[in-house]
């Protein structure tokens, strides 16, 4: 399998699917709809929906109930980036080589577009719940999504991250691990868990997928830190050394580049070995894990 | 019935209920939890959960499934205020006589606390969906909540409001009506509809409650505009004439004070007359409608 090509093909198919779930009806609120579209389709690897779909397929899922959740998690991921880039937060003008949402639409509209994406994610997912009323798995998938996106998930990590930067708080390893686990791993965990739940995996299998997501997220985030030091603008689509500019405590700053690289390998091997013990065909998911972790952008 | 005392009693009971639904477990993310608590318990009439509960009771609802939704809608209302007050939006330092969330916790934390409240609202409501899996009414109530809070509901109104102000756009009456219907009425409609749905009202009854909410919202918002002109700081808990300061197009600016007052009466009578045609005991709801519209703060 040419994994890079396969990923590109899947990402493209996922984008087409997400597009069908975006709001269509325009009106006086057209600007926010444009800003939502701009934000969602400004690029991105579509990693979360891709993981979700692959997990669903691995456990034998066949229907299209997964699609609403794939769209929803990408909307949630996107809103988090839009708010994260705001002047009051990381104040980033570029992401993936494109102007950020507030740089194009202004700060107020970016706040609202983020709110709108978060809310629309749940509108999208609840439609699946209503259409499949009586199927507890769909309601449970929704619950996983909401929890992993919230204060005990992604937002929780974001809060501690922001606070550590703003207050010039001396960050310790425990806090850094907390940030990585919540800010980065939480949505990856949700992706893998939701795919499993909707395909009918049992609780133990879902917990295993959660554990794989945790490891994958750690490896992914540390790789991100490494790339911030070693990458180029062309590779990353954003200024290099922006972590350093923002005086950000990263895994690389704590452990040094070599140890960081070693830990990426270790966490990714742990993630893959969890997969290998589970039933189903995990060829693609396995390759995807390894690709993500060895990526150079 | 001493309606003012009854409303205060109910608001107090509702606050106690909401408190039980707020997140408890603290951790590194304690600041956002504090900011969420601060925002939710900085006062407020608890109008939306009160309307929801009264609608539920009017249609004979008896269980406690309504409580999660009462808490959720107040969280959504609160998040909208927190984001609305931000420097990039209305830039308000005070609300209800207290410092706004960003004035206390800073801008970044206020953005995140708003995000967290919106997300936690859905976490709270989805728990009710999971606990009542198989009861399609609960999933439908969730769907109403999400739609009325979104781009075709509250956020949509907020977007047009912000855009009209920022661009110094000449606002027309059609646009003003759009803003009022979405920004103010949408959550009131949701409150009345969700109470009805969960109590087992039929689709026609739910549509009637929606219509009552639309009228109530219009009357409520126009009354708000009137109070901005005629009220005092003590009554309102915020600077007088802030609409004027912000050069905001209001109903009063369009129609003049006398016509505005007349229309408040007209819309409120229409709202009440919808109630009067429905089954159930609507004594309290009727009084609440009239009280809200005749309020002086």
Image (cartoon, coloured by chain):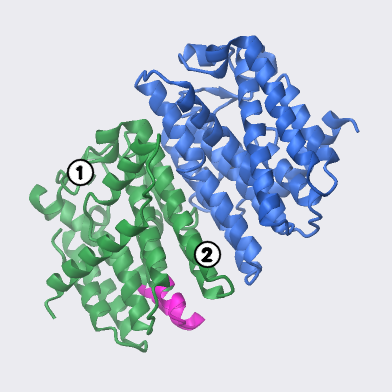
Chain colours: A green, B blue
Report the residue at 65% width, 40% height from top: B211
Answer left or right for B295 relative to B176.
right
Residue A198 in magenta? yes
Q: Give the residues in magenta.
A: A194-212
* Circle 2 chain: A
Indicate the secondary structure of the residue bearing disc 2.
helix
Q: Quadrant of residue B62?
A: bottom right
Q: Is residue A144 among the parts visible in the rendering?
A: yes
Q: CA distance from mark 2 to mark 1?
A: 35 Å
Q: Position of residue B128 (x, y in %)?
A: 64, 62
Q: Secondary structure at mark 1?
A: helix
Taking the image as shown, residue A102 lies to the left or right of residue B231, namely left
Residue A46 visible in the current orientation: no
- Would you place residue B24 above or below residue B107 in this image? below
Magenta span contains residue A249: no
Position of residue B213 measured from the top left corner of the image (x, y, whole percent): 65, 38
Chain of the residue that carries numbered disc 1 in the rendered image: A
With A169 as the anchor, is A44 left or right in this view? left
Between B148 and A203, the one lying in front of the other is B148
Looking at the rendering, in which quadrant would you find the N terminus of chain B?
top right
Residue A12, located in which quarter of the rendered image?
bottom left
Figure quadrant of the C terminus of chain B: top right
Q: Which residue is mark 2?
A: A143
Mark 2 crowdedness (10 Å alpha carbons): few <14, some 14-19, many ≥20: many
* Above or below: residue A218 compared with residue B164: below
| Label number found at residue A242 | 1
User: Residue at the spot x=28%, y=40% of the render?
Assistant: A101
Whether pointer 2 and pointer 1 mark residues with C-beta atoms closer than 8 Å, the reply is no
Residue most extreme to the right: B1
């Amino acid at each position: 399998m040419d994994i890079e090509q396969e990923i590109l093909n899947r990402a493209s198919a996922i984008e087409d699917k997400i597009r069908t779930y975006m709001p269509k009806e325009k009106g006086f609120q057209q600007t926010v709809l444009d800003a939502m579209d701009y934000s969602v389709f400004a690029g991105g690897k579509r990693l979360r929906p891709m993981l979700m779909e692959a997990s669903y397929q691995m456990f034998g899922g066949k229907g299209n109930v997964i699609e609403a959740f794939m769209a929803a998690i990408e909307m949630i991921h996107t809103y988090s980036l839009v708010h994260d880039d705001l002047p009051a937060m990381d104040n980033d003008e570029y992401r993936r080589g494109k102007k950020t949402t507030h740089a194009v639409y202004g700060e107020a509209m970016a706040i609202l577009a983020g709110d709108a994406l978060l809310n629309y994610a749940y509108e999208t997912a609840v439609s699946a719940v209503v259409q499949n009323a009586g199927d507890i798995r769909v309601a449970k998938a929704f619950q996983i999504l909401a929890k992993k996106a919230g204060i005990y998930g992604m937002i929780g990590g974001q809060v501690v991250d922001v606070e550590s930067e703003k207050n010039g708080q001396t960050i310790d390893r425990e806090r850094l691990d907390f940030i990585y686990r919540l800010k980065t791993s939480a949505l990856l965990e949700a992706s893998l868990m939701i795919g499993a739940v909707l395909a009918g995996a049992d609780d133990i299998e879902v917990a295993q997928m959660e554990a794989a997501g945790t490891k994958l997220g750690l490896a992914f985030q540390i790789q991100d830190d490494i790339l911030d030091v070693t990458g180029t603008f062309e590779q990353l689509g954003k200024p290099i050394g922006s972590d350093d500019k923002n005086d950000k405590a990263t895994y690389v700053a704590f452990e040094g580049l070599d140890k960081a690289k070693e830990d990426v390998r270790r966490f990714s091997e742990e993630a893959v070995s969890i997969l290998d013990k589970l039933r189903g065909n995990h060829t693609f998911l396995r390759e995807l894990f390894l690709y993500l972790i060895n990526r150079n952008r």
